[in-house]
Every structure is written in structure tokens, then in C-alpha cells.
């Protein structure tokens, strides 16, 4: 039997509350979060061509390989899943929901595993789980070798350069978020903290203390990266309020009669 390639899913919105008598108030009710469309960081902007909400790889493409929608990424192509999952990761998504046929779900699960994302609504067979574990182990080993190589290169840095990086890191910690955002040497680093601020405020709307702890942990991590001389790519923030579970879905329109919406 041919694998079912089409699929769709809702955006995980809360259901409408039951009607209550006039004057009744629900103390636990929270303001509904506005949906946000995924954005592309600078390094991804140079890799893809974006036309509206559609993404292409080259100008020769007849159809987009993916679409950006509020709290959702859509594609009908299995070969696009690695790029789609990378976009999800750089937007701060930690877990996703997938919708589509069995082959699509398997490929999406493996692509998500490669980016460290959790799939909420798919339990893979043991063999696929084992394949995902092997993939993550290989990636971890590759990252370990990259870090070792980077550490070797840093050990050869001139003393004055190391001192400069340490001073820059200390300046990052001593300045306010606003000062770092306007500092030409630190605005890229601050964009990482700004992303965490947006995510944690949406994640903990009623717990500013917990949000502040995560923001401070991120700030300290970025400061260490500055001191180590790590390359930091800027992330553009559009006051997004990220939610933990997002959607990766197959787009019916892209796979039906070769049309796009």
C-alpha cells in the first residue's frame, strides 16, 4: 500500500472556554498568546530564498520546499526535513508535533533527533529509536572533535588576543541588555540573550523569578563563549513569544496537482 503523504494539523490552540454566567471570572484564565511565524537567522537567510511565507533553495525551483506559518512549518518533501528542523531549532523550539504518513513521520523523527528536538506525538518503533540514538551519538562525537580542534587553535592565540576576549566578556556581563544591544562588539551576542528573554517570558508568564534565572544562565553562557572566542551568529528577534510545542506538518496544497497556495 502506498504511503500516505498528505497531512495537516491544527496549531495547538486552546479550545474556547465554556460560557459562564455574567459577572463570573476565571482566576486561572490566562491571556491567549499571539501566534508567531518562524524567522530565519542571518546564516539561514543566506542559504534560502524567501518569497512571502515560501522558502526556495534556488531560483530554478518550481515549487517551494517549505512554508512558514504561525507556530508551524509545512513541507511535502522528505528531503526538506533536515532544513525544516534546523529552522525550528534556531527559533528556540524544543519539541514539535508532526503529521503525515508513516514514512514522513519516520524521516521527521530522525531529522528532529539530529537537531536535539523532541517529537511529542510520535512513538517510533525500537529499530527507528535505535537509529536515532546512533545518529545522535555520531553527532555528539563530531561536536566533541570540533571542540577539541577549536580548543587547540585557541591555545595558539596570542596572549593579547586572549586578554581582549576576556575583557570583552567582562564588559558584556557588566553592561545592561540595552547597552549590549547598542554595542557594536556585543550586539550579536546580545541577540542570543534577547531570544531567551522572549522565550522565557512566554514560557513562564506567571513566574518572573524562574524566567530571570534562565535568562541569567543564558547570559553567563554567552559570556563564556565570548571569552573562548566562539563565533556568534546574530538572531533577529521580533518580540516573539515562543511556545514549547510547535508543528511540523505536511502541506496538502504542495503535493496536490503541483499547485501552491
Image: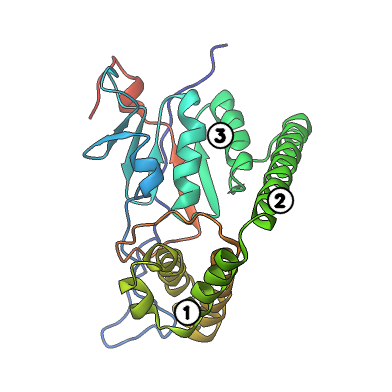
Kindly state the secondary structure of the residue where label 2 is placed: helix
Label 3: which secondary element: helix
State how far apart marks 2 and 3 are (Cα): 36 Å
Is there CB contact under 8 Å for labels 1 and 3? no
Query: Residue 17, relative to residue 29: is it above or below?
Result: above
Q: Mark 3 points at which residue?
A: 108
Res. 220 image quadrant: bottom right
Is 238 rendered above or below residue 61?
below
| Viewer-proximal residue among 212 and 108 | 212
The secondary element bearing badge 1 is classed as helix
Q: Locate the C terminus and report the quarter of the image it occupies.
A: top left
- The image's mark for residue 171 is 1
* Residue shown at 48% from the left, 56% from the top: 232
Give the quarter of the image for residue 23: bottom left
Sequence-first disc among 1 and 3: 3
Q: Nearer the viewer, mark 1 or mark 2?
A: 2
- Which residue is painted at 48% across and 70% down in the image? 203
Judging depth in this view, the residue of 123 and 167 nearest the camera is 167
Residue wearing tag 2: 152
> Which tag, 2 or 3, sits closer to the chain's start?
3
Q: Determine if residue 196 is in view.
A: yes
Q: Which residue is pictured at 51% across the width and 81% down the height?
A: 212
Packing grade of label 2 (10 A; few <14, some 14-19, many >=20) is few
Mark 1 or mark 2: name the one nearer the start of the chain.
2
Q: Are marks 2 and 3 in contact (CB under 8 Å)?
A: no
Up the image or down, 31 lies above or below 133; here it is: below
Amino acid at each position: 500500500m502506498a504511503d500516505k503523504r498528505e497531512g495537516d494539523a491544527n496549531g495547538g490552540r486552546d479550545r474556547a472556554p465554556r460560557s459562564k454566567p455574567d459577572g463570573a471570572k476565571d482566576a486561572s484564565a490566562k491571556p491567549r498568546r499571539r501566534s508567531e511565524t518562524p524567522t530565519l537567522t542571518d546564516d539561514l537567510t543566506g542559504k534560502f530564498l524567501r518569497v512571502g511565507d515560501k522558502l526556495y533553495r534556488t531560483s530554478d525551483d518550481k515549487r517551494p520546499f517549505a512554508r512558514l506559518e504561525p507556530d508551524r512549518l509545512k513541507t511535502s518533501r522528505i528531503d526538506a526535513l533536515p532544513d525544516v528542523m534546523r529552522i525550528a531549532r534556531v527559533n528556540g523550539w524544543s519539541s514539535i508535533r508532526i503529521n503525515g504518513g508513516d514514512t514522513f513521520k519516520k524521516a521527521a523523527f530522525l531529522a528532529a533527533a539530529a537537531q536535539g528536538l523532541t517529537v511529542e506525538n510520535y512513538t517510533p518503533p525500537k529499530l527507528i529509536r535505535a537509529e536515532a540514538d546512533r545518529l545522535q551519538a555520531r553527532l555528539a562525537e563530531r561536536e566533541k572533535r570540533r571542540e577539541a580542534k577549536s580548543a587547540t587553535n585557541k591555545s595558539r592565540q596570542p596572549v593579547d588576543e586572549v586578554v581582549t576576549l576576556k575583557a570583552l566578556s567582562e564588559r558584556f556581563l557588566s553592561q545592561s541588555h540595552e547597552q549590549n544591544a547598542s554595542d557594536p562588539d556585543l550586539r550579536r551576542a546580545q541577540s542570543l540573550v534577547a531570544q531567551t528573554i522572549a522565550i522565557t517570558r512566554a514560557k513562564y508568564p506567571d513566574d518572573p523569578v524562574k524566567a530571570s534565572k534562565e535568562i541569567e544562565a543564558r547570559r553567563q553562557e554567552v559570556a563564556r563563549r565570548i571569552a573562548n572566542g566562539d563565533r556568534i551568529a546574530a538572531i533577529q528577534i521580533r518580540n516573539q513569544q515562543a511556545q514549547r510545542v510547535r508543528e511540523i506538518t505536511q502541506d496538502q496544497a504542495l503535493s496536490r496537482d503541483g499547485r501552491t497556495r
